[in-house]
Amino acid sequence: MTQARTVLVAPARYASGDTCGFDARIDYEAMIGWLRAEGDPRSSYRADIFDLAVERGLKGYHPVGDDGVSRFWSSYWSLAKDYTPGLAMAKPSGKPSGAGFVHFTRADLPAGVSLVHKLRHGAVDLQFAGWGSRLGPLQEQLGPYLEGNMYIVGTAGSAAVRIDVEPLRPAESFDKQAHSVKGALDAARKLQAWAQVQDLSFLRT
């Protein structure tokens, strides 16, 4: 099976330090420190570029919305609101063309656990931040309780209990993909219900 890992590179203040569904994140400020420590002109120049990006970020980031993708997200939200209201998806607005991770804001999941639909990847993940290098212990704790089509997958910075679903194309017609969206919402609801009956106290150790 081919695996891909994604890394969010952004200022520390972006999304309050959250990984936003990516496998890991690297803050600009950390990169600036590494580059300054190199001490050579090329590294200093690169550090200056990241410094400028951080400064501009403090003045506000205004993503350019994509009309087609924004309509898809709006239709997704409308369906989710009626079909799976318990998943609590935030109402979207002005989504850029690259927007592809839907986060379900469940307040009853432990800290560090998130429920994410990765549209283009064809995956719904119950994601565990920081567990990417601890697949063995996670498999030991949760493996015996996995149901049906659930499986554990590791990434660079996190791990997840995953259900595969149909990949979606946010730039194309929502109506033609509505059935696949319902399938993904069913998977998210299944993972939500499963998580609520598991003993996840081991995550604090």
Image (cartoon, helix red, strand yellow):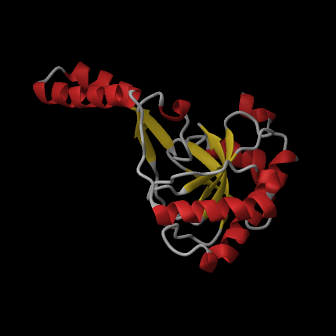
Total marks in image: 0
Q: Position of residue 137 (x, y in %)?
A: 68, 42
In front of the other: 39 or 91:
91
Q: Is residue 146 visible?
A: no
163 over 203 or under it: above or below: below
Quarter occupied by the C terminus: top right
The answer to whether residue 17 is visible is yes
- Judge left or right: residue 105 versus residue 25: right
Residue sitting nearer the eye, 62 or 86? 62
For the residue pair 91 and 126, the one nearer the viewer reads as: 91
Q: Position of residue 23 (x, y in %)?
A: 52, 46
In this rendered view, identify the residue nearer to me: 186 or 88. Answer: 88
Task: Identify the residue at horizontal 44%, vertical 42% (top origin).
Answer: 8
Question: Please, is residue 85 above or below residue 149 in the view?
Answer: above
Q: Residue furthest left?
A: 41
Left or right placement of residue 157 versus residue 84 in this view: left
What residue sits 61% from the left and 47% below the top?
A: 159
Can you tell which quarter of the image residue 186 is in? bottom right
Q: Quadrant of residue 119?
A: bottom right
At 52% from the left and 66% from the top, the residue drawn is 170
Horizontal and vertical percent for residue 203?
73, 34
Q: Is residue 191 left or right of residue 131?
A: right
Find residue 97 and report its horizontal and vertical position in percent. 44, 59
Residue shown at 49%/45% (left/top)?
156
